[in-house]
Image: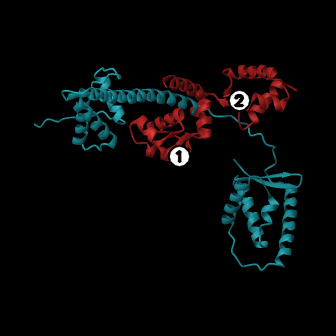
Amino acid sequence: MNQRALIEALLFASNKPLSMKNLSQITGLSKKDLEKLIAEIHQEYSDEKHGVMLKKISESYTFLTKPEYHEYVEKVSERSIGDLTPSQIEVLAYITFKGPITRKELYELRGKSVDNVLRELLNMRLITKRKSKRKGRPYEYMVTNRLREILHMASMEDLINEIAEISSDNS
Amino acid sequence: MEQEFVFSLPQFEGSLDLLLYLVKKHEMDVKDIKISIIADEFLNYINQMKRLNINIAADFMVMASTLMELKSKILLPNKSSEDIESIRKAKQELSERLVAYQQMKKLANKFKEKLDEALKLYSVRVKAEKTSDLSIKPENFSKLQELFEHVSRIIKAREKVYRIKSEKYSVAKKMEEIYETIQRKGKINLEDILVGADDRVELIVMFLAILELIKLNKISLEILENKYSLEVVR
């Protein structure tokens, strides 16, 4: 049995990204072997003759279509999110970086009402709300796992970490 | 001849946006805002909006009054040290909000870039399922017939016990019901669905509904070792 082909089969067949641990449990291969195999697969698919690529998304691996073909892929595949307005993107950014965050805090950051945008984002299931434990128990808003998965595809976590560092430096 | 005036009033997303614009326009340091100039211009802008009948959001009015209050305090002669301190604090607060706003704006731009990037990627998945023959072959057909007879017998036995209400069944309605059931339960045994029929007529209608759903590629029938299971096609 070709071990590299096995890993490739698993990554293609799984409906979610697979971690080293997942792969090692299924195949019984060591982490070191897996790393080598994954590097080989990665190398092979980075060749321009392939339309898909292997991507590491926060410690897990998955195949994605290459971005340069997105206009065409869009025609056969459902987009994960529809078009967003500038206001929606702005508020989504604040919630991603500062969430969980209350409506009042969002208003202060933005200097503008956020009510409509929040409702739209909730309807699109990009954010969710929960009662906070703070005084007055206001709602806190945060991004959903669905959005987080999408953002992880573009390594958004790097940006989030970067920002976490900046804001902790300030305080 | 009357002269035509063309107004072009830049649009601002909010009071902080306008404030930041004014500060930049006068090449001021965000940390040292010249309140009196900014307050006048801010008010000026609001007046222009009024003249053009643009709805003015509440936050513009709040900001305008904050700025005017601060300006009047600054203009007062013979300030006590407390007054000076409170002016300093108010100015600092304003600066901090502006700095935070500027930072968030930058972040929002970066976020947008990343999001655009992410939306160009589609996850790839080979639909790795045990392939079953979806076309109903003659040999499978006889098996389906067996199943039909089998379920009919169960229903017949039940008929002796229950009174059957006369009811009209429609294939379209059944299709909807069955589709919803399968959607809710995931994979489901064909027999389990059919046994739900109250009488032979309903059983036939259900059968037709299921065949129709398969034909429309809404659900798939999997036949594995005499087990028939239905699943929603994704």
Which of the labelled discs sits on residue A60, or is there none?
Answer: 2
Indicate the colouring scheme.
Answer: by chain
Which secondary structure, mark 1? helix
Picture coordinates of residue A17, whole percent (x, y): 71, 33
- Amino acid, disc 1: Leu
Left or right: where does residue B232 sit relative to residue B93? right
Q: Which residue is mark 1?
A: A122
Q: Residues within 10 Å of mark 2 (few under 14, many from 20)?
A: some
Of the pair A109 and B210, the residue shown nearer to us? A109
Which secondary structure, mark 2? strand
Identify the residue at image location x=84%, y=60%: B144
Q: Which chain is cyan?
A: B
Q: Is residue B8 visible?
A: no
C-alpha separation, residue under disc 1 versus residue under disc 2: 28 Å
Chain containing the residue with disc 1: A
Picture coordinates of residue B43, whole percent (x, y): 24, 35
The colour applied to the residues of chain A in this rendering is red
Identify the residue at image location x=29%, y=23%: B25
Which of the labelled discs sits on residue A12, or is there none?
Answer: none
- Amino acid, disc 2: Ser
Quarter of the picture holding the N terminus of chain B = top left
Left or right: where does residue B95 sit relative to residue B42? right
Where, by quadrant of the figure, is residue B206 drawn? bottom right
Looking at the image, residue A12 lies above or below residue A32: below
Where, by quadrant of the figure, is residue B105 drawn? top left
Left or right: where does residue B196 sit relative to residue A1? left
Picture coordinates of residue B26, whole percent (x, y): 28, 22
* Disc on the earlier residue, 1 or 2: 2
Q: Residues within 10 Å of mark 1 (few under 14, many from 20)?
A: some
Identify the residue at image location x=28%, y=33%: B67
Left or right: where does residue B115 sit relative to residue A105? right
Of the pair A51 and A150, the residue shown nearer to us? A150
